[in-house]
Image (cartoon, grey):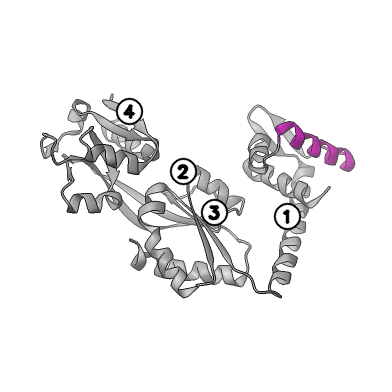
Amino acid sequence: MNLESLKIFLDIAVLKSISKAAQKSHLTQSALSQQLKSWENTLGTELLHRSNKGASLTDAGIIAEKYAAQICKLYDDMITEINHLKPSQHCLSIYAIPEVCNYALPCTLYEVKKQFPQCHISLNEGSSSMIEERILLEDGDIGFISGPSSNPELSSYKVFADKVMLVTSRSTLCPDEITLNELPRYPLIWSAQLCYVHKAINSALERELNLNILYNLDSIEAVKLAAVKSHGAAFLPYISIKKELYSKQLKIINIDQFQICNEVYMIKKQNQRGDNDTKQLLRYIEKTLIDTLC
């Protein structure tokens, strides 16, 4: 059993899915399953319960997970100590939901680079669920998601809240205020990246509202451009439209007695592995984040 197979086994334990672990490792599911079966044959016992719902650890699998984690940690510690003997550029990996990635964090990372010029920072965009997976697998050091995480292996705390506004082009004729029940009258440009908007609307009305959605776009930036071009109204985070509101390219349509607020939480893995440089960087980001957001 080589080290890479141990790491794949740990991925399965976290993701509770052989197919997801195979996708992450860029292996076919059959190739990964063969590796596992070979290890199980060597140990003389099954490590996983396999079913249509995913994979879970057997009693032997729980023991194997404990020692596999220790072996991988010892290896990582060895690599870290060896790397300390030679000059190298430190890396920090951050995952964030689109509005935070594109509109909030760039200013913070600029300040981080001034304080830690040798640090290489990667900022990656993704959905909240994908970000939680990446942080659990330690592909990322910290993540920024919508709402708190319910996973006990992750620590999360609220860093800021951003209003989500219904906006349209200044040239579009429409009232300054509407009721939530009147919303289906207006053509909307939508994005799957703002899935929490639909939930908030249905929750407020306690029923499904049949919205007039013209089309879905992949990104918040594309939705904003379509709204500016008078293609329809759109729900957009305030942080993403400050410039367009100031320049009067967009205007806000208030919805009577209804407001959406996206609460952004920073997450990281409990008992996170990492060297002192990483921990120092994370402490600096936590300390300065609110004052340095764009």
Element carrying mark 3: strand
- Mark 4 Cα shell of 10 Å, populated few (<14), some (14-19), many (≥20): few
Element carrying mark 1: helix
Residue 25 tag number: none
Q: Earlier in the sequence, mark 4 or mark 2?
A: 2
Amino acid type for the residue under numbered disc 3: Leu
Whether residues under marks 4 and 2 lie with C-beta atoms below 8 angstroms apart, the answer is no
**Whole-Å distance between the Cαs marked 3 and 4?**
35 Å
Element carrying mark 4: strand
Amino acid type for the residue under numbered disc 2: Ser
Name the residue beneath numbered marker 3: 154
- Mark 3 Cα shell of 10 Å, populated few (<14), some (14-19), many (≥20): some
Whether residues under marks 3 and 1 lie with C-beta atoms below 8 angstroms apart, the answer is no
In the rendered structure, the answer to whether residue 252 lies left or right of residue 2 reads left
- Tell me the chief SS of the magenta region: helix
Name the residue beneath numbered marker 4: 215
**Residue plotted at (18% across, 46% down):** 249
Name the residue beneath numbered marker 1: 69
**Residue plotted at (69% across, 28% down):** 51
**Residue plotted at (48% across, 49% down):** 149
**Residue plotted at (74% across, 46% down):** 62
**Whole-Å distance between the Cαs marked 4 and 2?**
20 Å
Residue 127 tag number: 2
Q: Is residue 77 visible?
A: yes
In the rendered structure, the answer to whether residue 121 lies left or right of residue 229 reads right
Q: Nearer the viewer, residue 153 or 132?
A: 132
x%, y% of residue 24?
A: 64, 42
Q: Earlier in the sequence, mark 3 or mark 4?
A: 3
